Image (cartoon, grey):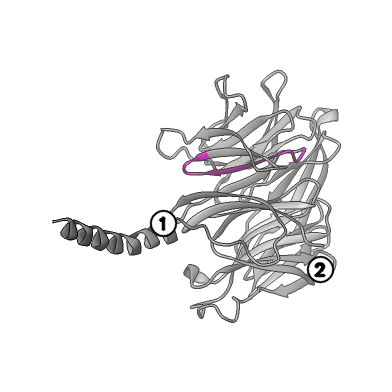
Amino acid sequence: MSSRIALLAVLATTTALPCLAQWAESRAAPPLPPGLASLWRVDGRKLDANAAAWSLAAFSTDGTLVGISNDSGTRIYRANDGRLAHMFPAPITMGQFAYSLAISSTGLVALGRVGGLDVLTLDGHAEPAKYHCLGLCGPVSALAFSPNGAWLAYQASSGARDPWPGIVNVVDLKSHARVAELEASTTRTGVSFAADGRTLIAANVTRVDDSGTFGLRAFSGGAGWRRTRDLSGASVPSGSIGPFAFTERVAAYSRAGQLEIRELATGALVWAAPLVPPALDAAAAAGPITLELVAFAPRGDLVLSYESPPSGAAPGTLVFRSMSDGATVAMYDVAEVSALAFAPTSDRFVYTTGAGRTYTALARVPR
């Protein structure tokens, strides 16, 4: 009898070992790309082969916090060591996921929703402050806190054929009141504050699909939010494809398999660089490379993009390029990046993945 029990035990062990190995393999997080100067990483959930998660990423205006938002909620981490500062669960209401994310230097977290936004505190004790768009509006897709934490600007997306102008709302965070409604873009949203904390910059795009222009408008909080600059901008070249990213000086987009940087004021092409193909040992891509994400370094010297083959046929590439001439500074092969962001100091960046074993990594910017 004892020999039979021993035999059954051996059979059970040998049968379980492959299962345990498969389980461990499924739990293992993918390695970081070679050469990446990672400061920390946080491993997330495991998604099945047919699932892909959207994500948002943002640093606080002072760079001390970094937030990642997806359909499971919003996590705020300490930027210096990756410790979790707070977790905000996803709303119970269907369709009320976050469409934009911003974090203030005073510890406020703003999440854009359909028709408005929530402003939460890191201590989680107070009920979220809620602000809404006037009239009918889509998702709030652009958010920005002023560097001094005094103001919050937000704007909702609208359709290309919407006859009404896009409205940028400004909230005084001390009085919790909306103090300005500023006319800006109709088809693409984008808001940011200048370093002085009083100048608000809004993208002013008339249309983006082989016609129209992309420009910007500036408003001064020190002058009753009077418009101080109105740049109609450059014409959109035929065949341009988003995502469209802006600074005060230039716009980025893809066209004919290249990343192009164009001056807003004159429309002059600054440079064009071919999108990066997959690594030599990767599976053959079944179509053209796509520009997925773009972020500009606040210092103005680098642009970071994520470029990938269609349908995840091979890992995509994080590419750092010089803003002066488009020269490649560094490249990292990473699968399924879903969000990325620069720190305000331009010395660090964060990215998060949205397929397989997901993870978030914060790393030094290559120089």
Can residue 173 be seen from the camera position used here?
yes
- For the C terminus, the image quarter is bottom right
Helix, strand or loop under label 1: loop
- Could you tell me the amino acid type at mark 2? Val
Q: Residues within 10 Å of mark 1 (few under 14, many from 20)?
A: few
Helix, strand or loop under label 2: strand
Name the quadrant containing residue 210: bottom right
Q: Tell me what residue is drawn at x 46 percent, y 33 percent.
A: 91
Name the quadrant containing residue 102: top right
**Residue under pointer 2:** 270
Q: Tell me what residue is drawn at x 49 percent, y 72 percent.
A: 313
- Could you tell me the amino acid type at mark 1? Ala
Viewer-closest of 279 and 193:
279
Q: Nearer the viewer, mark 2 or mark 1?
A: 1
Can residue 164 be seen from the camera position used here?
no
Question: Would residue 47 appear left or right of 333 to someone viewing this image?
Answer: left
Q: Residues within 10 Å of mark 2 (few under 14, many from 20)?
A: some
Relative to 299, residue 66 above or below? above
Point out residue 86 in the picture as x, y percentages from the top left corner.
59, 32
Count of numbered circles on the image: 2
**Residue under pointer 1:** 51
Relative to 180, residue 274 above or below? below
State which region is magenta.
62-73
Q: Tell me what residue is drawn at x 82 percent, y 41 percent.
A: 194
Point out residue 95 in the picture as x, y percentages from the top left corner.
43, 40
